[in-house]
Image: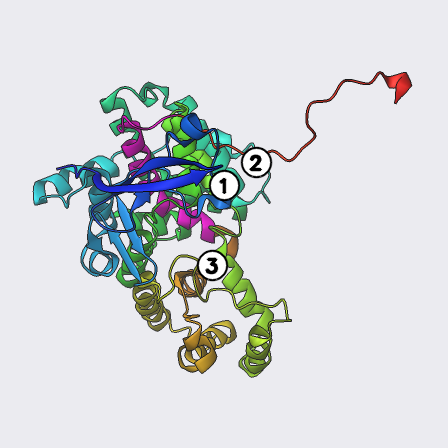
């Protein structure tokens, strides 16, 4: 059942001696909001909030974050419980539909996704139009946007059945596209998806199998991949999700909206954080150099920063990091690569960060990006594939958020305003008089 926004009373705002009454609204949990929708109409002023860090742009029932307490809930379920007990497909169903599936619902949903994994035969030719050294994210942006040209029968956003089909197609085909982007970049032939494998195992096989020999997917690595997908499936109104919603507010088709989310995710300040953390580890290079870099991180006059520690939202321990840490160690044990120098640096840096008074006091705990970068590196993925994997997982959240927005009667086309500081109106001066 849909929870109603609650009226929590009112607030008063005085502007140039005139007072305006503004409603205060509340959700089921989290901060209350001041409803300013009529402020410009009544008072002729905008609010100013660069980055929208204090602005609620929508009403949502999908994901809740309490950064101070280190809480992340998908549809009310703690992220660690889902990662430990659910599959990614089960989590995807939850995000899309609002409740955990029954046995039969999960079987039907899983069957549907498995049978949408293949791409149109002509689609493979599309990959060959890219240079071999193209960044995989560049390929992802182009190919996902092109899905609307191949599957235009499900682009009618006003048709519920079409929206459902497009959602299933994107969730199913995103691993296939991602694996092809990787294979293309290394010059290997594409691997056809197999319907007898689960979501994560199928993806790993498409990435690492070759036609010349059989490939056995490790259950430990498949489960680790599944958990990584769960942990990255949604994260409230972040930059890429807001981009998807903004694009969708114009009535754009779902494939184009998800492509816009991928473009936003590509930014190093968003989806590239785990790649940045691994780059930092490579810069440190060896365990004996860690004290030098720790000293630099504590020096406020030194521009060096430890990547993969702390989080913009979480002022406590990132709730995903605990699960990712255990997953990381399980993968390292499975592969027997703990002696690799880079991983040795990571483990020692982790130990220092969890024990050093400076990091503990400032709550600079290792976050999910720190552990996911190490894990993906150990599994064999190059760093330029990290954000691609993020996009595969986040597609589910983007689709859930997009669907919620489409069905919300209060949503309008996004139209942020501005504080204009340019030249006021002035007369044109002819060229020979300038």
Q: Position of residue 27 (x, y in %)?
A: 23, 44
- Find numbered disc 3 in the image and state the secondary structure of the residue it sits on: helix
Q: Is residue 385 above or below residue 284?
A: above
Residue that carries the numbered disc 2 in the rendered image? 419
Camera-side residue of 92 and 172: 92
**In the rendered image, which quarter contains the C terminus?**
top right
Residue 265 position in % (x across, y down):
47, 45
Which label sits on residue 270? none
Mark 1 or mark 3, whichever is nearer to me: 1
The tag on residue 274 is: 3
Residue 298, compared with residue 226, is above or below; it is below
- Mark 1: secondary structure: loop
Task: Quote the CA–CA distance across marks 1 and 2.
Answer: 7 Å
Is residue 190 at least partly visible in the picture? no
Residue 134: in magenta span: no
The answer to which of marks 1 and 3 sits earlier in the sequence is: 1
Q: Left or right? Give the position of 208 relative to 26.
A: right
Q: Is residue 403 magenta?
A: yes
Which quadrant of the structure image shows residue 431? top right
Q: Is residue 223 above or below residue 64?
A: below
Label 3 to label 2, Cα distance in Å? 35 Å
The image quadrant that residue 191 belongs to is: top left
Q: How many marks?
A: 3
Nearer to the camera, 71 or 137:
71
| Residue tagged 1 | 48
Q: Specify start and end residues of the magenta stretch as a single range.
A: 386-412
Q: Earlier in the sequence, mark 3 or mark 2?
A: 3
The percent coordinates of residue 376 (x first, y second) are 42, 60
**Crowdedness of circle 1 by 10 Å Cα count: few (<14), some, many (20+)?**
few
- Tags 1 and 2 touching, CB below 8 Å: yes
Nearer the observer, 125 or 57: 57
Please, is residue 221 above or below residue 88 in the view?
below
């Amino acid at each position: 059942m849909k929870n109603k926004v609650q009226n929590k009373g009112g607030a008063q705002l005085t502007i140039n001696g005139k007072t305006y009454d503004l409603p205060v609204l509340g959700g089921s949990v989290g901060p209350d909001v001041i409803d300013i929708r009529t402020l410009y109409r009544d008072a002729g002023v905008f609010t100013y909030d660069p980055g929208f860090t204090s602005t609620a742009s929508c009403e949502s029932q999908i994901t809740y974050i309490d950064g101070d307490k280190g809480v992340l809930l998908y549809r009310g379920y703690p992220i660690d419980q889902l990662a430990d007990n659910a599959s990614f497909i089960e989590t995807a169903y939850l995000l899309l539909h609002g409740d955990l599936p029954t046995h039969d619902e999960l079987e039907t949903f899983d069957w549907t996704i498995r049978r949408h994994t293949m791409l149109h035969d002509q689609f493979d030719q599309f990959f060959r139009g890219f240079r071999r050294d193209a960044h995989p994210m560049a390929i992802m942006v182009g190919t996902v946007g092109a899905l609307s040209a191949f599957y235009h029968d499900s682009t009618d956003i006003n048709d519920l059945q079409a929206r459902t089909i497009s959602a299933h197609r994107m969730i199913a085909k995103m691993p296939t596209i991602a694996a092809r982007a990787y294979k293309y970049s290394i010059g290997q032939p594409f691997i056809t998806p197999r319907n007898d494998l689960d979501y994560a195992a199928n993806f790993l096989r498409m990435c690492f199998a070759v036609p010349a020999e059989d490939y056995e997917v490790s259950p430990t690595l498949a489960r680790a991949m599944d958990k990584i997908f769960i942990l990255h499936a949604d994260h409230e109104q972040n930059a890429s999700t807001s981009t998807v919603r903004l694009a969708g507010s114009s009535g754009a088709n779902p494939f184009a909206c998800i492509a816009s989310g991928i473009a936003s995710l590509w930014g190093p300040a968003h989806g590239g954080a785990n790649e940045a953390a691994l780059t930092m580890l490579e810069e440190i290079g060896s365990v004996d150099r860690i004290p030098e870099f720790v000293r630099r991180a504590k020096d406020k006059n030194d521009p060096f920063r430890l990547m993969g520690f702390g989080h913009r939202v979480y002022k406590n321990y990132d709730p995903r990091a605990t699960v990712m840490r255990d997953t990381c160690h399980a993968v390292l044990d499975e592969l027997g690569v703990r002696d690799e120098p880079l991983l040795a640096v990571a483990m020692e840096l982790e130990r220092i960060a969890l024990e050093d008074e400076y990091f503990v006091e400032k709550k600079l705990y290792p976050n999910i990006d720190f552990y996911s970068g190490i894990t993906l590196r150990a599994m064999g993925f190059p760093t330029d594939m990290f954000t691609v994997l993020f996009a595969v997982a986040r597609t589910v959240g983007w689709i859930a958020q997009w669907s919620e927005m489409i069905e919300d009667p209060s949503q309008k086309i996004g139209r942020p305003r501005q504080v204009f500081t340019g030249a006021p109106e002035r007369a044109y001066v002819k060229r020979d008089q300038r």
